[in-house]
Amino acid sequence: MFVYNEFIKKSLFGLKFFKHTWIGHEYGKLLGEYYINQDLGEIDFIVPVPLHKFRNLERGYNQAEIIANSLGTSIEKPMISQCLKRNKNTKPQKDLSDKQRPLNMLKAFKVNNKYINVIKNKKILLVDDIYTTGSTIDGCAKVLIDSGASEVYFLTVAIGDGL
């Protein structure tokens, strides 16, 4: 929705590290407007990019889930927060080079067995806060497609400049 700049960086930093969860709700509403205005097509449901359970415990919430929940409310689509699991406690992508990022995401995600039949032949919208190299989105999309999803799209609050 936005190019990653200083304002976006500060707001996402507040969301992720200072418990300013209201920012995530506002971004979710804005993503909803963006989704509707861009006429991005029909989806069946929304899936947030998951945090590893240790990072989720440490932070107390998943910022992508907060964004996805508000997005779902605004476009009247369900959000399934437990559909994907991050089964590998990866290093933060921001701390890695472009070459290290895809390797960091290898086998990092899996579909929760409880949702295997739910995703079959469905159009899924992945939601995250920022897109840089695409490694995280690619890792999530791959396991969803490999598990039977018909199509996977993504929306993020911000994208790195030049991508």
Image: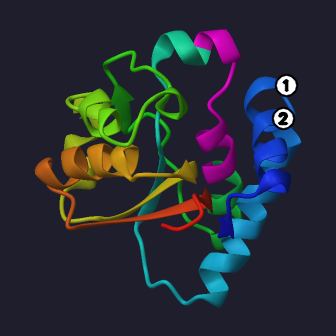
Q: Is residue 60 visible?
A: yes
Tell me, yes or no, whether the highlighted magenta stretch contains residue 127. no
135 or 73, which is in the foreground?
135
Q: Is residue 79 above or below residue 96?
A: below
Q: Is residue 117 visible?
A: no
Q: Quadrant of residue 73?
A: bottom right
Q: Which residue is mark 1?
A: 18
Q: Which residues are magenta?
A: 57-68
Q: Is residue 14 above or below residue 68?
A: above
Q: Which residue is mark 2?
A: 14
Horizontal side of residue 8 vs 101, given as left or right: right
**Disc 1 to disc 2: CB gap under 8 Å:** yes
- For the residue carrying disc 1, how many other residues have a C-alpha within 10 Å: few (<14), some (14-19), or many (20+)? few
The amino acid type found where label 2 is placed reads: Gly
Q: Is residue 92 above or below residue 82?
A: above
Image quarter of the N terminus: bottom right
- Alpha carbon separation for disc pair 1 and 2: 5 Å
